[in-house]
Image: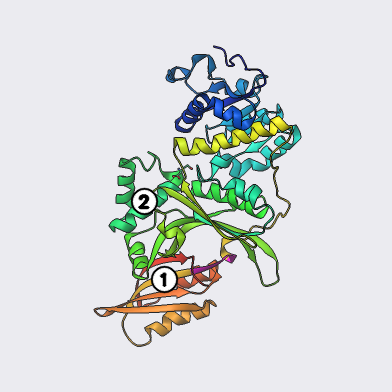
Amino acid sequence: MNTVAAPQEGAIRVALLGCGTVGGEVARLLTEQAGELAARAGVPVELAGIAVRRPDKHPELPPELLTADAEKLVTSDEVDVVVELVGGIEPVRGWLLAALKAGKSVVTANKALLAEHSADLFEAADAAGADLYFEAAVAGAIPLLRPLRESLAGDRITRVMGIVNGTTNYILSAMDSSGAGYAETLDEASRLGYAEADPTADVDGYDAASKAAILASLAFHTRVTASDVHREGIADVTAADLGAARILGRTVKLLAICERVTDDDGVESVSARVHPVMIPRSHQLAGVGGAFNAVYVEADAAGELMFYGQGAGGAPTASAVLGDLVAVARNRVVGGRGPRESAHAALPVRPMGQTPTRYHVSLSVADRAGVLAQVAQAFADHGVSIAAVRQSDVGDRASLVVVTHQAPDAALESTVDEISRLDVVHEVVSVMRVEGEDQ
Ligand code: HSE
């Protein structure tokens, strides 16, 4: 079987790696919108080959384009651009490095690969004078990486905070509206096709942590890898957490939070974390329901920006891939290149324990004299200032909610640990970090 079809004169020739939900849409749109794309790019953009694991499983695709040999396709003389939609680290990393070394530009949606190996990929792209674009790797259809990389390149970004995983947002939104528990809601999400058969990457926060690493790298001109990102998933979020949030007009979201933190000596560092968060229902991110994504960006000059849309799915993700392909084609037409890696700031990554956070702690305590004083003393002993206390009586017990001011996360964690061991505390009902309010 040929891997390469006869080229049109002057066309940009695309090797597509992977032809699942997104790849199928990319192949369809490249064919159906060939004329429009050529007009926008300034040159025809056409498929040169499609590498899939089992060509015989793709009767819908032109057989002359199909191959199982991705390694050979990516370095073919007939290919100008490699579009990678396979996912995972190996063997994809080797294919893309080989493609870049051979001078092919790369468009990829592979967040896990970029979150670990973007430095190597950018280095190979620089050495060959090739492009590396990856808009589809974070938040699907939402134009987010190009604004961070290009539109905001003249500004100083201080914060990128958002919902970058649709599966977990669907589950938390459903728990919030139904009052049901996590396991039951995950089962329902799987049954309805909102969660993968193996939901680990989504529910344990790995997917969001990879995306946070990419966002933090671009926003703060610093290499941040997935292992630099503090990660907690949603498996421990309970109906009690949602209930506690609701009482105070909040809801729970899994957020990726990337911040520029300046300490008392004026030294800057980057904090990148993914964990469940209570936010006020009035916050823009609280209204983002179902499987949608939304990312909130703060920059010195631009102020607050909000990006919202579909973070997954065939056509939405293909939209981002095709936008990148057109960019690569336009660069080729003028003999230029897109943006290179910008990691000049090389800020240190701040450990989670030293990152300033705020906690919401909901307790069931004995309702007698001195209990509140003991709880308050535990916060004081760890240097944590209390912002608000709310008590309501339930029989001979009291429900006590404490919301703190900002303190180092490790101090807050130690405080909760000490409180949980106090005799007067019957149960720690809910502990969650709070965002989106005055500090
Ligand atoms: N699995 C991801 C999500 C989509 O649930 O949002 C791809 O990044």
Q: Circle 1 is placed at which residue position? A: 361
Label 2 neighbour load within 10 Å: few <14, some 14-19, many 20+: many
* Spot occupied by residue 108 in the image (x, y as percentages of width and height): 58, 36
Q: Is residue 407 visible?
A: yes
Identified by mark 1, the residue type is Val
Image quadrant holding the N terminus, namely top right
Q: Is residue 344 above or below residue 439?
A: above
* Spot occupied by residue 405 in the image (x, y as percentages of width and height): 51, 74
Identified by mark 2, the residue type is Ile
* Spot occupied by residue 262 in the image (x, y as percentages of width and height): 65, 67
Of discs 1 and 2, which sits in the foreground?
A: 2
In the image, residue 234 lies in the stretch drawn in magenta: no
Depth order, front residue of 230/68: 68
Q: Circle 2 is placed at which residue position? A: 171
Say what secondary structure mark 1 lies in. strand
Quarter of the view holding residue 81: top right
Say what secondary structure mark 2 lies in. helix
Which region of the structure is painted magenta?
354-358
- Compared across the picture, whether 330 is left or right of 252 comes to right
